[in-house]
Image (cartoon, rainbow, N blue to C red):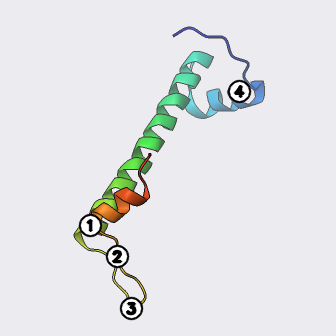
Amino acid sequence: MRTNIVLDDSLVSQALALTGANSKKEVVNLALCKLVDSYKEKDIHRQNFIKSYFDEPIITEDFTPLNRDDIYARYSLY
């Protein structure tokens, strides 16, 4: 996709030096890849936590775990 954007020259210079990239385009593509990977990793950790919670709910004296239907009802997008 072709687009025009205004970039902070100082940040671009730092990114070029740190990454060894040869162009602004390469730096922007690298940054986008890292951003996407970071969000995917966060989502994987969140999904793993939810799965482990369903397998082994947290139980203490003052805490009653929610069942799957309660969780979906609470976070539905109606």
**Mark 3 residue type:** Glu
- The quadrant holding residue 15 is top right
Mark positioned earlier in the residue sequence (1 or 2)? 1
**Mark 1 residue type:** Phe
Q: Distance between the residues labelled 4 and 2?
A: 51 Å
Which label number is shown at residue 65? 2
Q: What element carries label 4?
A: helix
Density class for disc 4 (Cα within 10 Å; few <14, some 14-19, many ≥20) is: few
Q: Name the residue under label 3.
A: 61
Density class for disc 1 (Cα within 10 Å; few <14, some 14-19, many ≥20) is: some
The residue depicted at 69 percent of the width and 16 percent of the height is 5
Mark positioned earlier in the residue sequence (1 or 3)? 1
Instruction: Report the residue that reaches farthest toward the front.
Output: 78
| Residue 23 visible, this orientation | no
Q: Which quarter of the figure is the C terminus placed in?
A: top left
Q: Name the residue under label 1.
A: 54
**32 relative to 56, above or below:** above
- The quadrant holding residue 71 is bottom left
Density class for disc 3 (Cα within 10 Å; few <14, some 14-19, many ≥20) is: few
